[in-house]
Image (cartoon, grey):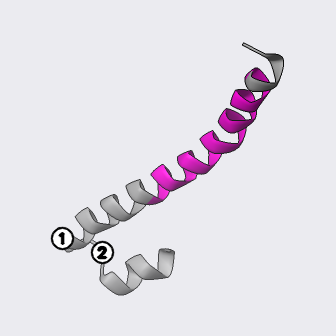
Amino acid sequence: MPESIKQAWYVVFVLGFPQSLMGYTWALGFWYGGKLISMVILSQNNFFNVF
């Protein structure tokens, strides 16, 4: 495999992993917030104030 392709894969991983981690964190936050709203522990207004 040429060196430029190896470097490209490295850059894709270094730049893509943090961005996907941020998306997963947002998804987890919305999922957990939805659980709290459904259990009436948190109001919708307070949930959206956090986000």
Tell me the distance, in whole angstroms, between the alpha carbons under discs 1 and 2: 8 Å
Graded by Cα atoms within 10 Å as few (under 14), some (14 to 19) or many (20 or more), the crowding at tag 1 reads few
Q: Residue furthest left?
A: 39
Residue at 18% from the left image edge and 70% from the top image edge: 38
Secondary structure state at the residue bearing disc 2: loop
Quadrant of res 1: top right
- Principal SS element in the magenta part? helix
> Which of these two is toward me, 51 or 41?
51
Residue type at tag 2: Leu
Label ID, residue 25: none
Q: Residue furthest right?
A: 3
Can you tell which of label 1 and label 2 is closer to the viewer? 1
Q: Which mark is residue 38?
A: 1
Residue shown at 55%/47% (left/top)?
20
| Residue 7 lies in the magenta-colored region | yes
Q: How far from the left and from the top, in percent, is residue 6?
A: 74, 21
User: In this picture, which residue range is highlighted in magenta?
Assistant: 6-26
Nearer the observer, 13 or 6? 6
Look at the image and say whether residue 20 sits in the magenta stretch.
yes
